[in-house]
Amino acid sequence: MISPRHILLGIIFVFFLCSASKIATGQEIETGVSKELALYRKTVLDKISYILEFDIPKERTGNIAATELLSFHLSANDQTLQLDFKEASSKVRKLIVNGQNIPIQHEKEHLLIAAKYLKKGSNQVKIEFQSGEAALNRNADYLYTLFVPDRARTVFPCFDQPDLKATYNLTLKVPADWKAISSAPLKEAIILNGRKTCQFVTSDTLSTYLFSFVAGKFEQQSGNIGKGKTEFLYRETDTAKITHSMKELFKLHKDAMSYLEDWTAIPYPFQKLDFAAIPDFQFGGMEHVGAIQYKAAALFLDSTATKDQLNSRNNLIAHETAHMWFGDLVTMTWFTDVWMKEVFANFMADKSAEGNVGKAVFDLKFLIDHFPAAYGVDRTAGSNPIRQQLDNLKDAGTMYGNIIYHKAPIMMQQLELLMGKDKFRQGVRAYLKKFANSNASWPDLIGMLNKYSDQDLEGWNKVWVNEPGRPVVDYTIEKKGDKIGRFTIKQVAEYGRQRIWPQLFELTFYYQGYTRKIPVNLNAAQIELKEAEGLDVPLFVLFNSSGQGYGLWPLDMDMFNHLYDMEKPVNRATAYITLYENMLDDRYIKPAALLTLFVEGLTKEKEELNLNLITGYMGTVYWEFLSEQERNKLTELLEKKIWEAMLEQQGPNLKKLLFKTYQNIFLSKAAASRLYEIWKVQKAPAGVKLSEDDYTSLAFSLALRAGADAAVLKTQLLRISNADRKKRFEFIMPALSADVTERDRFFKSLELKANREKEANVTAALYYLHHPLRQSGSVKYLDKSLQMLEEIQTTGDIFFPQNWLTATFSYYQSPEAARIVSHFFNTHPDYHPQLKAKLLQATDNLFRAQKLLK
């Protein structure tokens, strides 16, 4: 037995060692990039530059030899310097500091350089290493880097934090037939012995996550956007898509740039703007300076594209272009404020469209784009504030989600309404000018805007930005005969402590033959709407009629009989959203009744965006909130109604939306036979235009149904000519197999990271693997899917954990699935809080179904 005295001496000795280590290094060495480490490095480092060379072999399996010359100025030299490199120590071949070969010391994802090798003032670090590949996204004949949020350190040693901006000089050695773009213009390309050396000029000053390059077998198209020549790399082979899209892609970038230059009063701030279309890209796009990357399928559309697809492409391009000012020119100091760059990108993308389409169309588009997605998170127990805390960049990926992409633009719209458009723009311009080529935080911005506002923005900010959730709004009318005597509106928090969301919105009174709009400033827990007093009692009231207010709004039951009589599309859209949100909360209307109400609109709703909204809701209600018995009872009538509506609607896009809805919900043998014949001869119904992608989707839908021709998938594979799309199809096929053992093998394969590299393909396959028609055989995968989540968060890109959960759990409604999730929560009480929140978000409908299906 050890004596108490020996224990005490041992504790003192360990404490001394730990203290000595901390004095030597300046910071505790820990995995990732801690906030403390980042703050320290920011105080001592500046004038950072990287000279990088990557020798990329033709073979996908070959190692990439690399060299780096890192220069920086050090203002204090009393501590060990940590250089981030999330790779094995064995990949570092040589480390030379200020001309001296030093021992390689690599610990917890950091190269450690002792103070004795450094000096105050200018320093140089030369490194020979084998490049890491976690963020290189290597394919057989192309690759692209994707470093957001902290993944530059998985490829080369660096100071991987957003507020240590640097310049980059890049050289790529690639096969002679490859093309390449990077953050800076190409200086020269020399071909020798079947290899090409691409040397790029010095880049602008960038954060590490914004540095990038793309290289491989691409086609190249040149154009002019702004002040210089623009290069576009792509691998699309469909001539119809290329012809239909190419000119428009350059125009959309040019239009977005012109708008932003005018709105910000700052010319395009970088040397050039190139972009690349990447097959099966993980995101919609990524705003790398000088080398924007996009998902190819989002850019290349043909004449069959719906308005929703066109709007999504327009938004995507405007979003990434807006990032050049909001995120790239002025970058958040720390990823706590990652939402700032995303909210401005989305908000400015929306604003750039407003002048082209008019206010009515803009209001509708803004409402449909943002509110359902924001509510989809904010109504859940896993909701998060817009601004979240972050202690270590290794967890920065968990910050992303629909709150920052969709609630934040709604918040920003409310802020603009509160301040007024002119003052809001003046404040934002001042902010951009002050922090150009630097970093800023949300307090920096809100402090700047406060100078241009008469309102208390600090108090407003607290509930909108720093807290999660939404208000539940209700009202009462006291009548005096046929007049309104008193109209009271009140708000309560949907969950959590009581608080007030100050906001501006409109409500509309509907009368026989006319309407009356009333603006509302809901700035207290309860208000009296004086403007309503003395007015005639309306047929019904529509809350949030202009679609600007945020919350769970009340419904006037008398609206149901007049739903499709409302003239303005935005009024109908806000009614559809309010109906669906209240159905989920088990207020006013049940799922089957809501489905019936929306079916009535299939022929009456002529606005494409609205029809897309209600058919999407119909699919969700049908698969998630009706029992199997209810589905079987309703399906033939529902199929009949949808098909008849498709024939009756006039616009080709409206017809296509209804055809896709029919494809989504069909169960009967007659419907299966009808769709099989359409797929087999590739002849769409009259007035409907279908592309190769549409026939591929149809083949997948047929393969899911029992009794489908086993040759459907094999035949469809032979019809696909594009090599990238063929590979995607081949990856997804096992998830659709009628053989459960093949599906088991496919799911088992996902346990290996190498089989999850194409994350977009994985999530598509998971959707089919867990489709309601396959859940009797797939529910057994749920527990393992949850066990894999932490590893997926560590190894995957920023959206993959959420996409993994959504694709896995979205359509489950069974008590067995709910028990598996509940058991996981109960047996993991200290589970990663951000991942737990994402799981609560993804399974919210599952647990609501337990109540709604009773």
Image (cartoon, grey):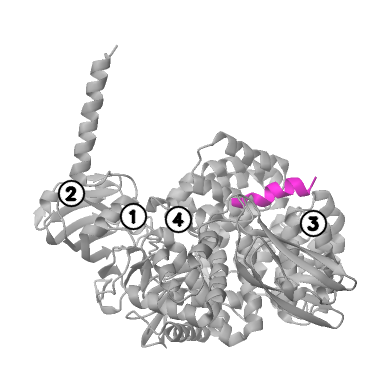
Sequence order check, earlier mark of 3 and 4: 4
Residue sitting at 63 percent across and 61 percent down? Answer: 375
User: Which of pointers 4 and 1 lies earlier in the amino acid sequence?
Assistant: 1
* Neighbours of disc 2 within 10 Å: few (<14), some (14-19), many (20+): some
Q: On the image, which quarter does residue 448 sit in?
A: bottom left
Q: Secondary structure at mark 1?
A: helix
CA distance for labels 2 and 4:
30 Å
Residue 758, image x and y in percent?
49, 58
Is residue 712 visible from the viewing direction of this image?
Answer: no
CA gap, disc 3 and disc 2? 63 Å
Tell me the residue that label 2 is attached to: 79
Taking the spot 81% from the left edge, 62% from the top edge, the residue there is 595
Residue holding disc 3: 591
Instruction: Give the Cα distance between marks 2 and 1.
Output: 24 Å
Q: Given this view, does label 4 or label 1 mark the residue nearer the observer?
A: 4
Tell me which segment is drawn in magenta: 841-854
Farthest-out residue, right: 481
- The quarter of the displayed image where residue 158 is located: bottom left
Task: Say whether residue 744 is left or right of residue 119.
Answer: right
Which residue is labeled 4 in the image?
397
At 56% from the left and 61% from the top, the residue drawn is 402
Crowding at mark 4 (Cα within 10 Å: few <14, some 14-19, many 20+): many
Q: Does 206 appear in magenta?
A: no
Chief SS of the magenta region: helix
Answer with the quarter of the image where residue 436 lies. bottom left
Mark 2 or mark 1, which is nearer to you? Answer: 2
